[in-house]
Amino acid sequence: MGKLRHERSAGGVLLIPIGERLLVPLITVPGTEVVGLPKGRLEKGETRADAAIREVREEAGLTGMVIETLGTISYKFWAQSEKVRVSKSVEFFLMLYRAGSPSKFADTEVDNVRLVPIEEAEALITHSGEQAILRAAHRRVRDLSADGWMAVSDRPARARLGAAVA
């Protein structure tokens, strides 16, 4: 059959409160029309949460803090350049914006970064697994709002997130 390589990756749904809106960054994969969430492989010794923070910073130019896990998606694809089938699992985290600008993304990793309202993002994402992660993030934001933000342990993050969706 051929070689099968297993990869562990991490990514994030970064919440960016702007006035009354809550935006999320979406990336476009180089040379394609594929739109998705920032994500990538773990580096040696890195936790999945640390990888998610790094990947969002590298691919979207934005820094955030992890609030909680959202879920894991798994899929397989053919890596043409390496002539190997890859089985990939990606754990996604709900994150809150801290700093940065989408103009500072790594243009070797992505073609474009767009900030879109969370309620519009799912329709723009290409793959169903990432659409499901975005739905989970949107649902969790609504749940956190109903919980009075007590589930977010960082007090300044809780205040910023609460103001954004109140």
Image: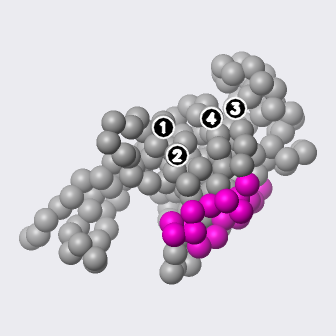
The circle on residue 65 is 4
Q: Is residue 133 magenta?
A: no
Crowd around label 2: few <14 · some 14–19 · many ≥20 (10 Å): many
Question: Residue 46, relative to residue 124: is it above or below?
Answer: above
* Residue type for callout 4: Met
- Residue that mark 2 sits on: 54
> 15 or 131, which lies in front?
15
Marks 1/2: CA distance? 6 Å
The circle on residue 143 is 3
In the structure shown, which secondary structural element does the residue marked by tag 2 occupy? Answer: helix
Considering every residue shown, the one lying at the far right of the view is 19
Considering every residue shown, the one lying at the far left of the view is 1
In the structure shown, which secondary structural element does the residue marked by tag 4 occupy? Answer: strand
Image quadrant for the N terminus?
bottom left
Q: Which residues are magenta?
A: 101-120
Residue at point 33%, 36% (across, down): 45
Discs 2/3, front: 2
Mark found first going from the N terminus, 3 or 1: 1
Image quadrant for the C terminus?
top right
Please say if the residues under marks 4 and 1 sit with CB atoms less than 8 Å apart. Answer: no
In the structure shown, which secondary structural element does the residue marked by tag 3 occupy? Answer: helix
Mark found first going from the N terminus, 3 or 4: 4
In the image: residue 110, left or right of residue 9:
right
User: How many badges with numbers are in the image?
Assistant: 4
Marks 3/1: CA distance? 25 Å
* Residue type for callout 2: Arg
Q: Position of residue 148 (x, y in %)?
A: 78, 22
Please say if the residues under marks 1 and 2 sit with CB atoms less than 8 Å apart. Answer: yes
Please say if the residues under marks 3 and 1 sit with CB atoms less than 8 Å apart. Answer: no
Residue at point 30%, 63% (across, down): 76
Discs 3/4, front: 4
Q: Quadrant of residue 61?
A: bottom right
